[in-house]
Image (cartoon, grey):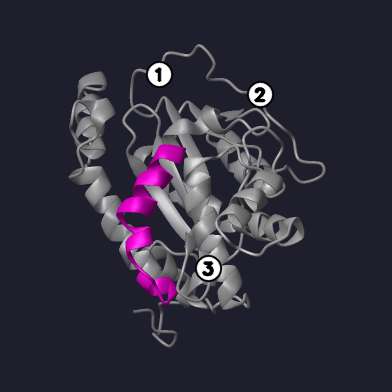
Amino acid sequence: MIEPNIPGLSVGKQCSLLSISRSSFYYEPKGESEMNLDLMRVIDKQFLETPFYGVRQMTWHLRNEQHLVNEKRIRRLMRLMGLMPIYQKPNTSKAAKGHKIYPYLLRGLRVDRPNQVWCADITYLPMRRGFLYLVAIMDWHTRKVLAWRISNTLEAGFCVDALNEAIHKFGPPDIMNTDQGSQFTSFAWTNRLRSANVRISMDGKGRFLDNIFVERLWRSLKYECVYLHAWETGSEARDGVRKWIEFYNHKRPHSALGGKPPAVVYWQRIETTNPDQQVQKVA
């Protein structure tokens, strides 16, 4: 789908148009054994059910399921997957040294309109012979996914790309809420938000429930799409995620929205709260 030798259209530009990071174009399967990749898929499913499992509890669970594992292996795999138990500060979601941590601004806040609060998070995507990472930016009030990107690394760049797309399409929110991961405490991320006059909110350490709406999105995505496929390439994963997010935004009934899809409610409430604003409906 991406052609590296098109005059005037670089690989980076093509990746941007297709909503994937440039690194995903160069995706190669990770060097994990088949046994470890199978374990990571099991861990990923179990973590959706018990997000409070740390390394020790996950190891015990896997042993009870007849997997011969030790804590050292499970610690490494959970770190690689970006998983964090809710009761402790996560390894892959800790802020880098020198990065500023911002307070949590949503406690007691009534969120009653689109673009008042956005949230963002990263999840692990299992492949047949490797794995990728997905970041999504969601409108807190309507649950609409505003932008997303896939990458084969946990560097901040693909998160900032998704943020730029969301702001370009929908304008900046009042508040952006994330966890304290290094991607979201990075200068590139926070500076982009400050330059758009967005207030920055961050969950408490290990507070899974502070960003619960994105966590529910991940659960739906994985059970309704990811676990039903065994993608071979980054392009296959991108295409599968794109189709599901389009379905989720525009067709999938949402219980919190009276059975209406998120995109329908988003645009209805934008028109209600901004009746004089010219609105161009985008994905």
Which residue is drawn at the image coordinates 40% and 61% (left, top)? Answer: 19
Residue at mark 2 to residue at mark 3: CA–CA distance: 38 Å
Quarter of the image holding residue 184? top right
Query: Callout 1: 10 Å neighbours few (<14), some, many (20+)?
Result: few
Q: Residue at x 51, y 11 (%)?
A: 108
Image quadrant in which you'd find residue 243:
bottom left
* Magenta stretch contains residue 219: yes
Observer-side mark, 3 or 1, equals 3
Mark 2 / mark 3, whichever is N-terminal: 3
Name the residue beneath numbered marker 1: 111
Residue 249: x and y in percent read 26, 44
Disc count in the image?
Answer: 3
Q: Quadrant of the N terminus?
A: bottom left
Residue denoted by label 3: 38
Q: Which residue is more in the foreground, 70 or 243?
A: 70
Q: Residue at x 48, y 64 (%)?
A: 126
Label ID, residue 103 = 2
Under mark 2, the amino acid is Pro
Is residue 101 shown above or below 53?
A: above
Proximity of marks 2 and 3: CB atoms separated by less than 8 Å? no
Prevalent SS, magenta region: helix
Q: Mark 3, residues whose alpha carbon is within 10 Å: few (<14), some, or many (≥20)?
A: some
Above or below 209: residue 43: below
In this picture, which residue range is highlighted in magenta? 215-236
